Image (cartoon, helix red, strand yellow):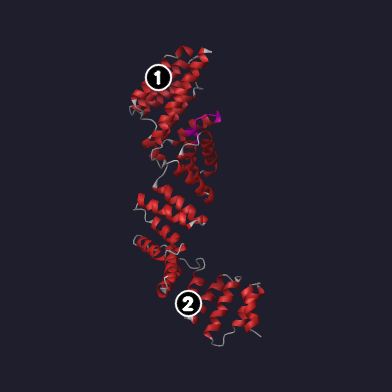
Amino acid sequence: MMKEAKHILFTEILASLRLCEKKISRNGAKTLRERSEIGTAKYPKSALLFLFILYACMMNAQDKPGRKAAIDSTFLGVEYYANENPDDAIQLFTSALKIDSTYEEARYRRGNVYYEENNLKLARNDYQWLVNHHTKTAEVYERLGDIDTAMQDFKDALPLFSEAIAIDSTQGSYFAARGLTWFYFEKYDKSASDLNKAVDLNYDSPDLYSRLGYADLRSGDNKGAALFFTKAIEANPKNYEDYANRGDALVALHMLDEAKEDLLYYMKFDSSDYSVWYNLARADYGLKQYDSSIASYKKVIILKPGYGDTYFRMALVYAEKGDFKNAINAFNLAIKEYPGDAYLYYNRAIAKAKLNDGSDYCADLKIAAGMDYELAINMMKKVCK
């Protein structure tokens, strides 16, 4: 019983030190490399000595052959790495594993050094061994997931991040990692849920705010998107893409002057993005700046022919300013791209009727009515014989 109790206490001490490491490594780390720089390895010497003075008192409780020597070698390895000597630390951890290949602590420590020195292939080997042996160290699953995402293997990363969260749901970085992985799969609702949880757990960064803003934007939450893009800009005003994305959200919220300001600021850095010109055209239309809106839609057509509903929107602007001839021409081009859209025929019919040049607008109403478009059916009854 005494040996068992001492072994449990030793395990608890290791767990406590890892918790201390985790708090250090989660303090603002964003990327795989940044985490290594903030790091789990440069522990205070006092903490190391305290840990291993305690374990030394328990050596007589270790009944597994060779375990004491493996622990001694691991202790030296941790101390060497604390003194920024990773190569010797790896050798000592490897020696520990040669003595006792089942000693998880040595493999965990060696995997950490490989990871923090950016040797992901060897780190993966150690972490995978630990996962295969059902380790309960959440960070192992997270780091193995990080390695998978670095290798663009997002499918395998997802269950690893989920397992890390299942073991320890207090770490915002785990939710952030899974949220970013959902983002790559374009599962924006799931991404937003995890990223919001990360923020709630005080894990944040400009990039996380940007991704959360984009996830909200794609999920239709424009208010949330604008809020998070604003936070991203406040944290890193040099990322001009956040201005473009916030502009997109602000157009949808009908905050058109603010949207236009963001979009024009973005264009100082990149004037070749067709989607930004598209949003600028939408903002100008809402501000009744019709000529500017049409000019922006024409720019979209040059940069990205056939993009979305550009011809249709441009036709609406022409119609709004009373230029029905050009509106009809734009509707013609829109119908050529989307011949099965009843709404286009209906709007072209209205433009023809307002132009009043003898065009057969009833023919368009008949086509739209044939597609069961109710407005066209009702209008055809009133104006067509």
Residue 126 lies, in percent from the top left, at 48, 30
Residue at screen point 45% across, 59% down: 249
Mark 2 Cα within 10 Å, few/some/many (few <14, many 20+)?
A: some
Q: What element does badge 1 sit on? A: helix
Q: How far apart are the two marked residues, 2 and 1, measured between alpha carbons?
A: 79 Å
Q: Residue at x 43, y 21 (%)?
A: 95
Residue 327 is situated, as x and y percent measured from the top left of the image, at: 50, 78
Above or below 79: residue 284? below
Q: Is residue 185 magenta?
A: no
Q: Nearer the viewer, residue 198 or 158?
A: 198
Q: Which residue is mark 2?
A: 320
Q: Amino acid at mark 2?
A: Glu
Name the quadrant of the C terminus: bottom right
| Residue for badge 1 | 52
Say whether residue 41 is visible: yes
Which segment did they paint magenta?
Answer: 132-141
Q: At 45% from the left edge and 21% from the top edge, which residue is drawn?
A: 96
State which quarter of the image contains the N terminus: top right
